[in-house]
Image (spheres, grey):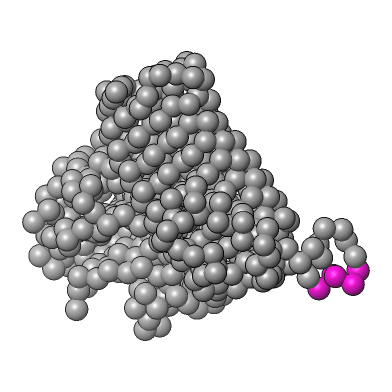
């Protein structure tokens, strides 16, 4: 069992409240996933700079020389065990290569123009507090609370998973053909950080979008290629989408108003939202892609 | 009237108070406000009491209900009225998956739609859905009546036993061993009784429905029926 929440603002005037609302929703879903939690937040683009979110191996300051060395090369914002590095997009590949050489113990958990990802072991409320989610602004965000059943409670196993710029995915369920799909994707040039099935789903969508599909098309294609139980909630730089498997094995409820689209594994997570009493509350149909996009 | 605010009172306190009522209580109705999707609201009741919930409820609302009337003025989460024995449960919005699962008796009325697996393994309960039901509804249903004013999703009545499925609208597909059957007089009588109990006798006519039931090829393994599995 896991919990998922997502919030996509249609009314950008709400942007300063996004983190606070997402933190509330995430906290309510603690019962579904008390082991670890994570979230992705899509905030302002940093004046055209790329954002690279790093997970530091220990708490801030325990990697001697890291912050100084990073500071020489780029802007750095440290939040608890994570750091967001800001640098010109053209310098990003060299930076990531340098980081892998100089500090192999540091993981890149996400990169893009707008997306930042934070995930950690602990209760969802404490994870949200440590990273200061409630004070973050943005246009959309996705969160996950994990109850580990098949593998150990580690930060590496926490969601969201990101396999492409500004792309992230959270998953409730389990895939049965992820090894075969992972091999196929590796053949296509993708690389994976974990043995996790959800990371394969993220990679699959990244691959489809790289080949020219939009988010909606990539998800529709996944219905034929990914086997197992899933409710996916996916974010891109400007988009937000939901897909459930053909027998709707895992719970999902959504709410839509003129101001937002919200997703929760249970209605309880949506009950904290302003205007929920007037929202259109519905259960997404199985094998049906629901997608919203502010871009283009 | 007793009003219980679930923003102030714990769910456990509410349910304990309802469980403590004598069967023939005159403390009725109860009004529950701020349910906010909490689970197991008014589950396990066994008294002639009416409980009105103002808002959306979470999982297993009115589960195992006996004798009580539970009204939800909102949507219901997974398993509303699951395993109900008697009484009446009424949802004014939509219901999530497995509404009325394994119910033995009583009446469940859903004013909106019910999603997947409505009436799964039902064992005698009557379920009326004014909207439509989702895929795999009445899976392995054993007894009772499922009445749907709208349509039904894929695989209706898969591996069905002796429940009757009355559907007024289109059925996307029938599950294994489920077939359409003629409406015989006992079926008409059963449907008329359920529509009347749900207060719909004047709104819809028995003739508007089609009946689906078991072809009875899967009760015992017979090699000639292997294709039906």
Q: Is residue A12 left or right of residue B10?
A: left
Q: Is residue A289 left or right of residue B217?
A: left
Q: Is residue A82 left or right of residue A10?
A: right
Quarter of the figure with the C terminus of chain B = bottom right
Q: Position of residue B34 (x, y in %)?
A: 28, 34
User: What span is in magenta?
Assistant: B223-227
**Residue lying at 60% horizontally and 40% vertically, measured from the top left:** B105
Instruction: Say whether residue B172 is magenta.
Output: no
**Residue lying at 84% horizontally and 70% vertically, measured from the top left:** B226
Q: Which quarter of the figure has residue A146?
A: top left
Q: Position of residue A230 (x, y in %)?
A: 50, 59
Dominant secondary structure of the magenta stretch?
helix
Front residue (pair A118, B100): B100
Is residue A13 at all visible to an observer of this figure?
yes
Front residue (pair A272, A281): A281
Question: Would you place residue A27 above or below residue A286 in this image?
Answer: above
Q: Which quarter of the figure has residue A259?
A: bottom left
Q: Position of residue B7 (x, y in %)?
A: 27, 28
Front residue (pair A226, A88): A226
Question: Would you place residue A252 above or below residue A130 in this image?
Answer: below
Question: Would you place residue A256 above or below residue B104 in this image?
Answer: below
């Amino acid at each position: 069992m896991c919990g998922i929440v997502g919030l996509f603002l249609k009314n950008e005037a709400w942007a300063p409240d996004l983190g606070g609302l997402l933190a509330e929703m995430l906290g309510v879903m603690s019962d579904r996933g008390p082991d670890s939690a994570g979230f992705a937040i899509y905030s302002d683009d940093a004046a055209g700079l790329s954002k690279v979110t790093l997970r530091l191996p220990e708490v801030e300051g325990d990697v001697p020389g890291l912050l100084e060395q990073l500071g020489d090369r780029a802007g750095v914002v440290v939040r608890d065990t994570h750091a967001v590095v800001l640098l010109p997009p053209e310098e990003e590949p060299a930076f990531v290569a340098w980081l892998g050489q100089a500090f192999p113990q540091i993981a890149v958990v996400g990169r893009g123009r707008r997306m930042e990802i934070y995930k950690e072991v602990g209760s969802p409320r404490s994870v949200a507090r440590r990273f200061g989610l409630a004070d973050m602004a943005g246009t959309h965000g996705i969160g996950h609370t994990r109850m580990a059943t098949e593998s150990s409670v580690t930060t590496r196993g926490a969601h969201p998973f990101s396999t492409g710029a500004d792309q992230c995915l959270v998953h409730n369920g389990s895939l049965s053909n992820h090894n075969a799909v992972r091999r196929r994707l590796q053949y296509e040039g993708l690389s994976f950080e974990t043995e996790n099935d959800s990371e394969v789903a993220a990679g699959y969508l990244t691959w489809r979008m790289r080949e020219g599909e939009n988010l909606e098309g990539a998800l529709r294609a996944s219905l034929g290629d990914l086997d197992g139980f899933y409710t996916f909630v996916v974010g891109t730089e400007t988009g937000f989408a939901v897909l459930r498997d053909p027998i709707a094995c895992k719970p999902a409820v959504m709410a839509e108003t003129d101001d937002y689209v919200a997703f929760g594994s249970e209605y309880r997570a949506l009950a904290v939202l302003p205007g929920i009493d007037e929202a259109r509350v519905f259960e997404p149909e199985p094998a049906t892609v629901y997608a919203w996009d502010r871009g283009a | 009237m007793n009003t219980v605010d679930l923003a102030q009172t714990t769910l456990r306190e509410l349910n304990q108070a309802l469980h403590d009522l004598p069967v023939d209580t005159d403390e009725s109705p109860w009004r529950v406000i701020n349910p906010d999707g909490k689970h197991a609201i008014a589950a396990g009741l066994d008294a002639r009491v009416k409980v009105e919930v103002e808002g959306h409820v979470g999982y297993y609302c009115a589960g195992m209900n006996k004798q009580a009337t539970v009204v939800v003025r909102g949507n219901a989460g997974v398993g509303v009225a699951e395993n109900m024995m008697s009484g009446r449960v009424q949802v004014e919005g939509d219901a999530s998956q497995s509404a009325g699962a394994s119910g033995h008796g009583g009446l469940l009325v859903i004013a909106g739609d019910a999603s997947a697996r409505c009436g799964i393994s039902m064992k005698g309960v009557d379920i009326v859905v004014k909207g439509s039901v989702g895929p795999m509804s009445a899976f392995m249903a054993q007894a009772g009546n499922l009445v749907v004013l709208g349509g039904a999703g894929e695989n209706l009545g898969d591996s069905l036993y002796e429940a009757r499925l009355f559907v007024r609208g289109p059925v996307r597909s029938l599950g294994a061993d489920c077939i359409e059957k003629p409406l015989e007089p006992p079926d008409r009588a059963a449907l008329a009784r359920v529509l009347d109990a749900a207060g719909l006798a004047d709104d819809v006519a028995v003739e508007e429905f089609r009946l689906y039931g078991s072809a009875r090829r899967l009760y015992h393994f017979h090699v000639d029926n292997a294709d039906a599995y």
